[in-house]
Amino acid sequence: MRGNIDGGSNPLVRYDQIERRIYQETIASKATLRNTLIILPTALGKTVITALAAAHFLYNYRRGRVLVMAPTRPLVMQHRDAFLRVLKIPGGEAAVLTGKTPKRNREAIWRGSCRLLFATPQVVKNDLIRGYVEMSEFNLIIFDECHRATKDYAYTYVAKKYIENSAWPIILGATASPGAERERVEEVCRALFIEQIEYRSEEDVDVIPYIKPVQVEWRFIDLPEEYKILGEKLRSLLDERLSWLRRMGYLNKTLNHITRRDLLELGESLRGKIQQSNDKGPIYSAIVAQSSALTLFHAIEL
């Protein structure tokens, strides 16, 4: 049973602890169907999305397990605390495995009855090599800060073993910063066997209702010379991305007349096209350039 996450319907979720956001439920539902990369800026709720997806599998597959990985021990503990705040999981069914957990304890946890596990990727890799971990037991593996999944980082090893040893693997990667270069993003997608990408920004139609308005008072001052130099470098980087988007036919205005609104509208158009296109590579390259340009616009304004 996959792909059906409705607000208020899963007994494992503490709905009084979260604000119901339709876009989070939509992304979480899609993430139960195929290997998914979610790209959301900080504060749009990546953790809630991953927790909703985890709750879906934990409730519908009573003997199943979910593994949540994060690069550092503090992040692992942070995820454990956040998940237990959002989900009704008995303490005995959740466990943490990091470099500070003795090997004999880790083996007992892997072979035990805990259904929701939080771990650092290096520990998972080491314990896979030792034969402690049975990957086929996991219905879902979550890779937080998944932009690190390149080259020899432990994430790539864990994902490969999961795909090789599970009949129905589902991978969910989450990041706020996938990288500005197409090759880097494609490398992450290959490493995690990603099949679909879910991207949102604060300007997306389904996100805007949940963004609280900010009162801004503008005060203009003379910048020190070093700030002017930095601004020129940022502008140069922005022009590079805008020029590429113009060459590829995604923008038709001159550089000096391209606005933030133009980029927002382009992003919305590209996200619609990527769902319909069989050749997603060029469109995703344009999304990366558009997102990077939008970030640079914001940095220059600051």
Image (cartoon, rainbow, N blue to C red):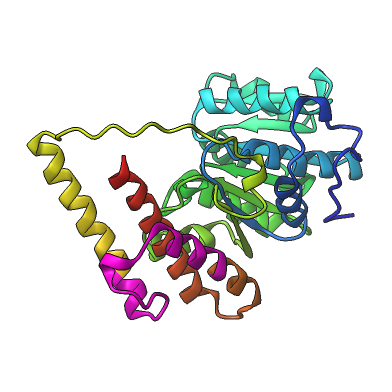
Q: Is there any visible trace of residue 57 in the rendered image?
A: yes
- Image position, residue 151 (x, y; %): 41, 54
Answer above or below: position of 200 versus 132: below
Q: Is residue 128 left or right of residue 229?
A: right
Q: Is there any visible trace of residue 14 in the rendered image?
A: no
Q: Is residue 135 or residue 234 the one in the foreground?
A: 234
Magenta residues span: 243-269
Q: Is residue 54 left or right of residue 147?
A: right
In the image, what residue occupies the spot 61% across and 79% down? 277
Query: Image quarter for residue 219?
Result: top left
Prevailing secondary structure of the magenta residues = helix
Answer above or below: position of 268 versus 93: below
Q: Is residue 231 left or right of residue 18?
A: left
- Image position, residue 145 (x, y; %): 51, 42
Q: Is 247 contained in the magenta span?
A: yes
- Image position, residue 56 (x, y; %): 83, 44
In the image, what residue occupies the spot 36% across and 72% down? 245
- Quarter of the figure that contains the N terminus: bottom right
Answer above or below: position of 77 versus 177: above
Q: Is 80 contained in the magenta span?
A: no
- Image position, residue 57 (x, y; %): 83, 44
Q: Is residue 9 left or right of residue 29?
A: right
- Quarter of the figure that contains the C terminus: top left
Most extreme residue toward the left is 225
Q: Is residue 256 or residue 74 the one in the foreground?
A: 256
Q: Is residue 262 or residue 120 the one in the foreground?
A: 262
Tally of numbered discs = 0
